[in-house]
Amino acid sequence: MINPIEDSPENVERGKRMFGIYCISCHGEKGDGQGPLYVNKKYNYPPASLISEKMLANPEADIYHVITVGHGIMAEHGSM
């Protein structure tokens, strides 16, 4: 899969806004998997840390794929 989103300042800003809406509650403000749903015990499965060495080594297309169609217990967000 190829990420069709151009790496532009506008898209980076949009990505930050979308992260705040769709991702921060699970993955946390820092992307470390310590979001409020997990920290407050409302979600008992630890979300992935987006800043781990493993995640940072993933190709951009793989990350785009997981966001788009989901993976494991993470739902798809492609429609959003």
Image (cartoon, helix red, strand yellow):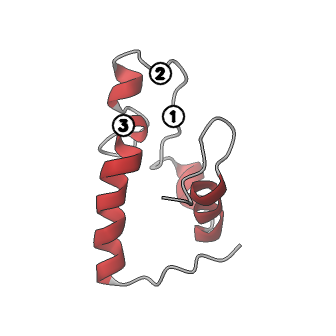
Closest to the observer: 51 or 24?
24
- What residue is disc 1 on? 47
Instruction: Relative to 10, say whether 58 is above or below.
Output: above
Which of the labelled discs sits on residue 25, or is there none? 3
- The answer to which of marks 3 and 1 sits earlier in the sequence is 3
Instruction: Relative to 49, say whether 80 is above or below.
Output: below
Instruction: Relative to 58, say whether 3 is above or below.
Output: below
Could one spot residue 58 in this view of the protein? no
Whether tag 2 and tag 1 are in contact, CB under 8 A, the answer is yes
Question: At numbered mark 1, what does the secondary structure look like: helix, strand or loop?
Answer: loop
* Crowd band around label 1 with a 10 angstrom C-alpha radius: few (<14), some (14–19), many (20+): many
Please, what is the three-letter code of the amino acid marked with disc 2? Answer: Tyr
Q: Quadrant of residue 8?
A: bottom left
Whether tag 3 and tag 1 are in contact, CB under 8 A, the answer is no
- The answer to which of marks 3 and 2 sits earlier in the sequence is 3
Q: Is residue 70 left or right of residue 9?
A: right
CA gap between label 3 and label 1 equals 10 Å
CA gap between label 2 and label 1 equals 9 Å
Image x and y of residue 15, in percent: 36, 65
Image x and y of residue 45, in percent: 55, 23
Image x and y of residue 1, in percent: 71, 72
Q: Residue at x 50, y 47 (%)?
A: 52
Please, what is the three-letter code of the amino acid marked with disc 3? Answer: Ser
Question: At numbered mark 3, what does the secondary structure look like: helix, strand or loop?
Answer: helix
Image x and y of residue 31, in percent: 39, 46
- What residue is disc 2 on? 43
